[in-house]
Image: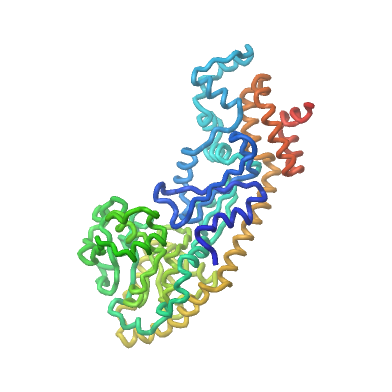
Amino acid sequence: MFSANNFYQWTYETYLKDKNFSMITYHPFGTRGYKNLQIWNLNVTKGSPDEILHTAQVLVNDQEPVMLDSIKSWKYEHTPKPPFSTITNIYERMQGIDFFLEQEDKDKWEKEKDKFTSTVDYFLANTDEITFASRLMFAGQYKPIIIHSELNSQDVKELDSEFIPVYVFWHGLISRDWYRHWKHHTTCNPNINRANNSKRFLLYARAWTGSRQYRLKFVEQIIKNNLHNSLKYNFFELDDGEYYGEYCDVNISDYFPQPEINLDYPENIFIQQVCLGNLGDNEKPTLEKKQEISSSSSAYIDIDDYHSTSIQIVAETLFETDKIHLTEKTFQPIVAGQPFLTLSAPGTLQTLKHYGFKTFDSVWDESYDGEQDHNKRMAMVIDEIEKLNNLSPEEFTKLYEKCLAICEHNRQHFFSDKFEQQMLEEYDTNFKSAFKKQQEYAKQDPGGSRYWVADKICFECYNTDFFYNMDANYLRYILAMAKQENLENYQAILEQYWWAKKLTDVV
């Protein structure tokens, strides 16, 4: 069973190390970071820090949904300066540093210096933003890869010109690690006695900002349909510094209580949360941190919640979208032996079936899973909740009994080697397919970004002996490395760039 803390290292060792690929993880949401994972950021270097010769880069965006604006901002913030003396020289000239230059070079600089403010500005003036980002940020010999965890994603398609996508069902693999102990917890077995609970539905939806804002609308509709008494749900008035009243016209806190926070913070709970990675080793459990733990504990199962409810309403991270990005939230009721309805993108239940799980279409109407209109899909889920809520105790128990075998199958399948093997084989297939695509792209763009940058700046922009001689030794070095890595690609580089052939002809 996979360990969350070692997933990146395993990926690097299995697929990337022998190819001299670097692996980059980043925080799409700043300090909030990645849940329960170390940051794996490898820079395999040869020679000086200016001679980082990764064959290709792999950007990991598998925990959170792909957000184009976040990727763009991250790239702008961390764009490196390419390791060419030409570019360094241009930068220093802009700082007013004088050199003893040939007259030809002085004349060229005087003529064109006003168009340069920085390497970044030059690229923006001469390329589109996608080319700028991919060429400067990912300077490998092959087109970069992005690892993601979403299906039917227009955002991933938008990145096709810049990256080769590799899909992995990250939360499926890692949830097995986070929930592994519950395999041996017999109280998680499906139980007909849960049908007798006064609260028929369990909802975790305490965070409601960003992509989760739809949850406010859902809870608002639950209240307006007078279904709130059938739900167990703790509500936070504040989330990420925002007050819910600015986004809805129902006083939700009048119907659902604020969760109580124990200021004494018992030691066993503190140890639990440290193990979950929500607190640092020496970090004290402040009131703010306690609230954060309470609102972001989807990697933890509160078995008492399942003993006191019958059916979980899974409120996924994404709802008002076509992309399917399933997280550990989807697996909570499966691990706890609970039936579920889901608030997620259309096709979510079909995706679960693809991975071998069963859903409850033989027990209640799941046609909401195929509804593309988000408002209608939410209304259909609420309609099913209302139907289930209106059943008499006898009718509900009879219906609930039909769910038990499905719950048992799902629980067994979640912990099975078959499920893990399916996800790993899929990951393996996608990686190998990406490597083949890299070779295909290399025929069109031999040498990748490093050689393209050299051509555009060092030679196309400043084609003089002065600049040529400044970068000649470095370029010979990376050409030698390209020849060592792939002779066919090396020959294609010589054919693509006139200066590469000239450099190799020099004894």
How is the model colour-coded?
A: rainbow
* Residue 168 percent coordinates (x, y): 55, 59
* Residue 425 percent coordinates (x, y): 62, 64
Quadrant hosting residue 87: top right
Q: Which quadrant of the figure contains the C terminus?
A: top right
* Residue 290 percent coordinates (x, y): 30, 58
Image position of 282 with respect to 272: above or below: above
In the depicted view, which residue is nearer to us: 301 or 499? 301
Give the number of callouts. Answer: 0
Can residue 117 be spotted in the picture? yes
Quadrant hosting residue 99: top right
Residue 375 left/right relative to 50: left
Image position of 94 with respect to 474: above or below: above
Image position of 26 with respect to 244: above or below: above
At 74% from the left edge and 35% from the top edge, which residue is drawn? 494
Residue 195 left/right relative to 149: left
Q: Which residue lies furthest to the top in this view?
A: 103
* Residue 390 percent coordinates (x, y): 30, 80
Q: Which quadrant of the figure contains the N terminus?
A: bottom right
At 47% from the left edge and 42% from the top edge, which residue is drawn? 74
At 71% from the left edge and 39% from the top edge, which residue is drawn? 482
Can residue 387 be spotted in the picture? no
